[in-house]
Image (cartoon, rainbow, N blue to C red):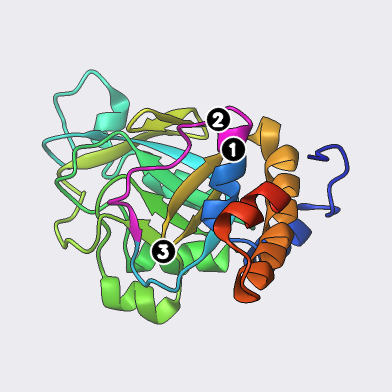
Amino acid sequence: MNNSQPLWANDAELFQIAKKELFVALVGDVLDKLGYEHQFLPPNIKPLNADFVLIGRAMTVLEADVFEEASQTTKNPLMKKPFGLMFEALDSLKPNEVYICSGSSPNYALWGGLMSTRALKLGAAGAVLDGWSRDTNEVLKLNFPTFSFGGYAQDQGPRGKVIDYRVPIEIKGTRINPGDIIYGDRDGVLVVPKEVVTAAFVGAIEKARGEQLVKKALENGMSTVEAFQKFGIM
């Protein structure tokens, strides 16, 4: 596998190639071969629309449960702020970044329509939530790639706050660092660590093009045993 010469000059070109030629399973297979075997997020994190495809750099967000919207008896000034640092986190989004949030109990929505509107304006690539989203009709109308447990209307206002962002987070044991690539489609959401982006995507492009040869061979009657022996792909 040639992982020293990327076929793209920047993220925008890479993301275009990924959307045109690749799918998430391919890149996951290559990460397995590279020794990164625990990079998929849990399968209950699904796109609100099965046709959504998301790829971008992680803008990580750390959420925590609370039990009132604004506390006046707190020793922590952040507890006085409704939603904590959520607005600051949202406003920090850059083009082609993914708002990816974890840390809370799955008792309320972490994303909604107004957040999608702001993220679209900033050029963000999508949102991935370790929890629920809401305002589903509005999010779908905006066509903003959102991956979550599904729709649940209960608001985070008196239940959760963003306590930090652009920091390392985890979702069910998968580590996500700011700047990692988040790649999602209907089959799952994959975290591609930034240190192996070139190897993972060069390998996936080679595998995608090789699979086309395998497909043609199978269509022409070659057995799966022969195909795997010849191409090493299945």
Q: In front of the other: label 1 or label 3?
A: 1
Residue at the (68%, 51%) spot, across then down:
204
Front residue (pair 91, 230): 230
The circle on residue 36 is 2
Q: How many marks?
A: 3
Locate residue 201, reporting x and y percent. 70, 48
Locate residue 162, reporting x and y percent. 34, 38
- Label located before the other in sequence (2 or 1): 1
Residue type for callout 2: Tyr
Rounded to the nearest angstrom, the CA distance separating label 2 from label 1 is 5 Å
For the record, the magenta segment spans: 31-46
The answer to the question of whether label 1 and label 3 lie on touching residues, with beta carbons closer than 8 A, is no
Main SS, magenta residues: loop
SS at mark 1 in the image: helix
- Label located before the other in sequence (1 or 3): 1
Residue type for callout 3: Arg
- Label located before the other in sequence (2 or 3): 2
Q: Which residue is mark 3?
A: 186
Rounded to the nearest angstrom, the CA distance separating label 2 from label 3 is 21 Å
> From the viewer's perspective, is residue 11 above or below residue 21?
above
